Image (cartoon, rainbow, N blue to C red):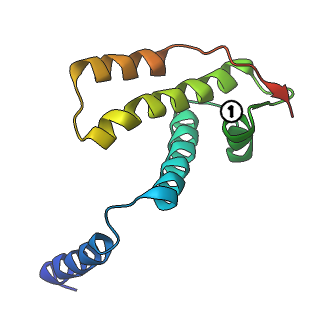
């Protein structure tokens, strides 16, 4: 396969994606939640967070605590998800300002106190 063939394939795929844009309603919400969970788990795993995929999901989707799970790891998951949420509105506006970045950094670097229910 030649490089130019790959470019043509990429262009065709982009055209297919463009036919489904802009995303709205349920499709947009599903994509947002998917990436919120995936990026939170992957980022934590890269940084040494010991929560599994399912434990991360339980913390974010159900507000559960993980019995025997390190509280620091659970708070890190919540902090990352909050940082993701902080950046969502500027992304929707298609404009990210310096205060937005400072807000994001503040959310990502602080621990959270969250009312959990046991799982």
Q: Check the image and report above or below for 5 versus 21.
A: below
Q: Nearer the viewer, residue 48 or 108?
A: 108
Relative image position of residue 86 (x, y in whole percent): 43, 28
Residue lying farthest left? 4
Q: Residue at x 50, y 43 (%)?
A: 39
Q: How many marks?
A: 1
Q: Residue at x 81, y 31 (%)?
A: 66
* CA neighbours of label 1 inside 10 A, class few (<14), some (14 to 19), many (20+): some
Relative image position of residue 35 (x, y in whole percent): 49, 49
Q: Is residue 31 left or right of residue 3?
A: right
Q: Check the image and report above or below for 30 versus 117.
A: below
| Quadrant where the N terminus is found in the figure | bottom left
Q: Is residue 13 left or right of residue 62?
A: left
Residue linked to disc 1: 50
Q: Check the image and report above or below for 75 versus 77.
A: above
Q: Nearer the viewer, residue 18 or 49?
A: 18
SS of the residue at dot 1? loop
């Amino acid at each position: 396969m030649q490089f130019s063939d790959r470019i043509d394939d990429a262009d065709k795929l982009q055209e297919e994606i463009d036919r489904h844009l802009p995303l709205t309603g349920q499709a947009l919400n599903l994509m947002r939640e998917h990436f919120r969970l995936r990026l939170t788990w992957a980022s934590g795993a890269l940084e040494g967070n010991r929560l599994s995929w399912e434990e991360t999901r339980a913390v974010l989707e159900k507000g559960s605590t993980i019995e025997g799970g390190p509280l620091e790891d659970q708070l890190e998951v919540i902090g990352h998800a909050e940082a993701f949420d902080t950046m969502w509105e500027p992304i929707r506006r298609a404009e990210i300002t310096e205060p937005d970045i400072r807000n994001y950094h503040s959310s990502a670097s602080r621990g959270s106190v969250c009312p959990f229910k046991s799982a």
